[in-house]
């Protein structure tokens, strides 16, 4: 009997969780390499090995796929269970170093560029990411707050310090991505941690 040509992947095989994961993996890689606008469903299908027609079944459209990638990246960097305990300053800096060494850390800034545009949902998701980062640092500072300060004023000072520290960590991240040969990641993180620890009392100092 003559062998029948082997068919391509069955539709039922392309709508499961494994197929969704492969599409997200491929999309994340391609978004980091090329950006959102220059990545098509055809590119993602080729990279993932999943047919182009199955991608909308999982994510409806490109915006849906972008949001799924954004949510997964943010959850991986700063998962919800992270807030079940208060991070130490060492843990905050350690997580930053881990992020910088991850393969697709450039995607964080790719998402930032997208968030600055007109994609309302992506913008809101990234705003939430920044907010959660700052809140984690604020909690850390609150636990080290002196007893003799005005709590309302102290809360404002802690919020400002969290914005500054989060910005410094993101700045180190960006420099390490752009000029890795001239940025010593560990030395930079140690330097800022040392400066922060030495001057932490200044957070609550009146202007």
Image (spheres, grey):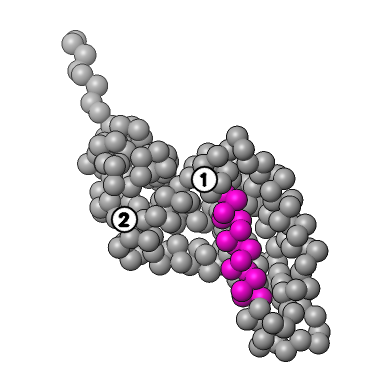
Whole-percent x, y for residue 26 in the image: 39, 39
Q: Is residue 178 visible?
A: yes
Relative to 62, is 78 on the left or the right?
Answer: right
- Labels 2 and 1: the sequence-earlier one: 2
User: Magenta segment range?
Assistant: 158-173
Q: Which residue is mark 1?
A: 105
Relative to 84, is 146 on the left or the right?
Answer: right
Whole-percent x, y for residue 193 in the image: 74, 57
* Residue sitting nearer the eye, 196 or 126: 196
* Residue occupying the far front of the picture: 207
The part of the image, by quadrant, that contains residue 33 is: top left
Q: Is residue 143 visible?
A: no
* Residue sitting nearer the eye, 144 or 68: 144
Q: Quadrant of the N terminus?
A: top left
Q: Residues within 10 Å of mark 2 (few under 14, many from 20)?
A: some
Magenta stretch, main secondary structure class = helix
Q: Quadrant of the C terminus?
A: bottom right
Which residue is at 29% across, 55% downward? 63
Q: Is residue 72 magenta?
A: no
The part of the image, by quadrant, that contains residue 22 is: top left
Q: Nearer the viewer, mark 2 or mark 1?
A: 1
Q: Which residue is mark 2?
A: 64
Q: Residues within 10 Å of mark 1 (few under 14, many from 20)?
A: some
Compared to residue 65, the image places residue 42 above or below, namely above
Whole-percent x, y for residue 32 in the image: 42, 42
Where disc 2 sits, the SS reads helix
Which residue is at 71% across, 69% downward? 140
Compared to residue 156, the image places residue 103 above or below, namely above
Relative to 113, is 185 on the left or the right?
Answer: right
Which residue is at 76% across, 69% downward? 200
């Amino acid at each position: 009997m003559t062998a029948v040509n082997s068919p391509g992947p069955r539709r039922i095989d392309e709508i499961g969780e494994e197929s969704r994961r492969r599409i997200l993996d491929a999309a994340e890689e391609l978004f980091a390499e090329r950006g959102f606008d220059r990545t098509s469903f055809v590119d993602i299908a080729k990279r993932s090995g999943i047919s182009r027609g199955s991608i909308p079944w999982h994510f409806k459209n490109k915006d849906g796929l972008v949001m799924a990638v954004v949510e997964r990246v943010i959850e991986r960097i700063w998962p919800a269970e992270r807030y079940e305990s208060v991070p130490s300053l060492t843990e905050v800096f350690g997580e930053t170093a881990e992020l910088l060494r991850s393969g697709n850390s450039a995607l964080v800034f790719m998402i930032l560029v997208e968030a600055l545009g007109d994609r309302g949902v992506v913008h809101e998701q990234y705003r939430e990411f920044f907010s959660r980062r700052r809140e984690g640092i604020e909690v850390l500072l609150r636990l080290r707050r002196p007893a003799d300060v005005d709590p309302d004023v102290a809360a404002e000072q802690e919020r400002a310090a969290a914005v500054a520290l989060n910005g410094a960590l993101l700045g180190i991240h960006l420099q390490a991505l752009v000029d890795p040969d001239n940025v010593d990641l560990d030395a930079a993180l140690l330097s800022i941690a040392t400066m922060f620890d030495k001057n932490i009392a200044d957070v609550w100092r009146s202007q």
